[in-house]
Image (cartoon, rainbow, N blue to C red):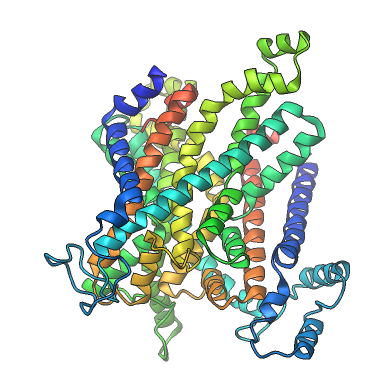
Amino acid sequence: MSARWLIGKLGVMAATLLFVIVFNFFLFRVMGDPTAQLARLPQATPEEIDKLKADYGLDKSLGGQFVDYMGDTLTLDLGISQRSREPVWDEIKDAIPWTLLLVGTGTLIATIIGSWMGVAAATRRGTRTDDGLLGFSLFTYAAPEYWLGILLILVFAVWIPIFPAGLQMSPGVEFSSWWAEVTDVLDHLILPATAMTLLLLGQYFLIMRSSMVDVLTEDFVVVKRATGLPWHRVVRSHAVPNALLPLVTIAAIQFGLVAGGAITIETIFSWPGLGELNFAAINDKDFPVLQGTFLVFSAGVILANFLADCLYFYLDPRVQSR
Amino acid sequence: MSGAREILLGSWRARISLGVIGLFVFLAIFGTLLAPYDPDASSLDLLEPPTWSHPLGTTENGADVLSQVMAGARVSILVGFAAAIISAVIGSVVGLASGYFGGWTDRILDSLENWFLVIPTLPLMIVLARIWNPSLLVLIAVIGLTSWAGTGRIVRAQVLTLRERAFVERARALGARDRYIIKTHILPNTLPLIFANTVLIVAVAILSEAALSFLGLGDPTRISWGTMIENAFDSGAPSEGAWWYLIPPGLCITLLVLAIATLGYLFEEYVNPRLQEVTTI
């Protein structure tokens, strides 16, 4: 039963991923004219353009290009960056750990603080605490995350210079030990991770709050209360674990939001992840890198959705018995 | 529509939100006329803090920040509303067709919807905006084309329940055609939901426009709040401590989005009473 479920989910994931890859081809070949990129060389003669077309495989028929593209993509050959002349996949491979570090830290902190705030608000519904937390979370939802990031730089790197304004570690420093290196990276991580946390916090809080309000009205909570268990024990040991379920899965599904946040926040803090790579490609009209990062972001979201499904399956017995 | 009136004027949150939206719509129309300076005009007062002649200081080119903020409202309002309308039309048509006709139409449209829900929106918008060259129309199209899936899903769910209701079955038994049933029974009962959802999409579209403009994909011929933040950041305003240049554009985005989202939630709560228990704001 659970093997069949897993195979079904894997099938859906593979199909979605394949669709993304096919879509990616048409996006760049059909909607945009790839020869327009080559025309960036102003003095190019027709012969030179023909040679470039042959280099990029653009002299073949659309069907032939498609076969080439599918073969290349499935073997992780994403082309050559027009800016750095490096293989796109190598640039992406170097960037992925930095994005995972930033996104992972932000998601973790947002989940902890968001669920704590959600419990505090749900158990004090209609009070001033509830109103204040709601107001704060709506503000962080409405405020652009890159703007909040810039304000963090203004306050904590310029006015009170306690944190670095950008980069992932101090440039040109020989670290005396691995520990010194780790603390240096953590020092650089604090502000961008705070910006990432602020991006996610509002949504996580709202989900936890409504889920907690739901759980608190369920029969088992009333029964636990009737057995004479103190209220805070009912909340902590019985209501919170049940209310956490939607938050855990939505935190994973929200990875699409995270991908967008990674682009703007990494740009602000010169954090060398996928988002900054994507931003550099926007400015340089570096289409292979743009295409590659879009593919990786999409694959990341699809994978995160799959993991969320698995997590839900593992955590919620009701799904398993279906 | 006494219900709508009650939502719009019934609570202080709604009244403040309406006031904020009204102010920014006013600025979108008359902002460039009322601005004390030409928002593009440079001067020799580079990155000056607020003074009597420049209440919000100046930019790195010596332009007046207040005038730029006033002029910037137009792009946000225009793109926000136009993109939300495109998104509402696509979402409604797809949701109606998919929910009403069922079968293969539903299967294909529903997977399309699911796919658009999965794809990370900002990266997709970036790709589209870069392929077509940035302009106001491209921004509207790109945001409208990528943000309809949620509406489609909500409309489809509503149509699925309406289709089975007695009054629709009665109409069908009497020989009414699909067109007639959709026009007189399905659509009127779905419109309030579409409307509430579209208000929320306006907020998302304004944030998307700001993000794209901030990333350098805005209309290069017009000032928007997103472009202002981009210019401020690129010109080193943070390290100069130029708070007067950094804070106003972001604060305007935040206030406008907050006001629109608040109204959207209130409308949503009204058309979907099941939500009243859960998301009271």
Quadrant in which the N terminus of chain A appears? top right
Q: Residue at x 70, y 17 (%)?
A: B164
Is A293 rendered above or below residue B69? below
Image position of A153 (left or right of B126): left
Classify residue A278 by image quadrant. bottom right
At horizontal 40% and vertical 47% (from top left) the residue drawn is: A202
Quarter holding residue A318: top right
Q: Is residue B55 left or right of residue A1?
A: left
Q: Give residue A205's position: percent from left, percent from top.
A: 41, 43
Of residue B273 and residue A243, the one placed in the foreground of this image is B273
Quadrant occupied by the C terminus of chain A = top right
Side of B79 relative to A311 (left or right)? left
- Position of B130 relative to A176 (above/below): above
Instruction: Report the number of numbered marks.
Output: 0
Residue B38 against residue A315 in the figure, above or below: below
Query: Relative to the observer, which residue lies in front, A99 or B155?
Result: B155
Residue lying at the far left of the rendered structure: B52
The image shows residue B207 at horizontal and vertical percentages of: 44, 53
The answer to whether residue B183 shows anywhere in this view is yes
| Picture coordinates of residue A121, whole percent (x, y) | 34, 37
Q: Is residue A78 left or right of residue B230?
A: right
> x and y percent of residue B226 in the render?
40, 61
Q: Is residue A162 visible?
A: no
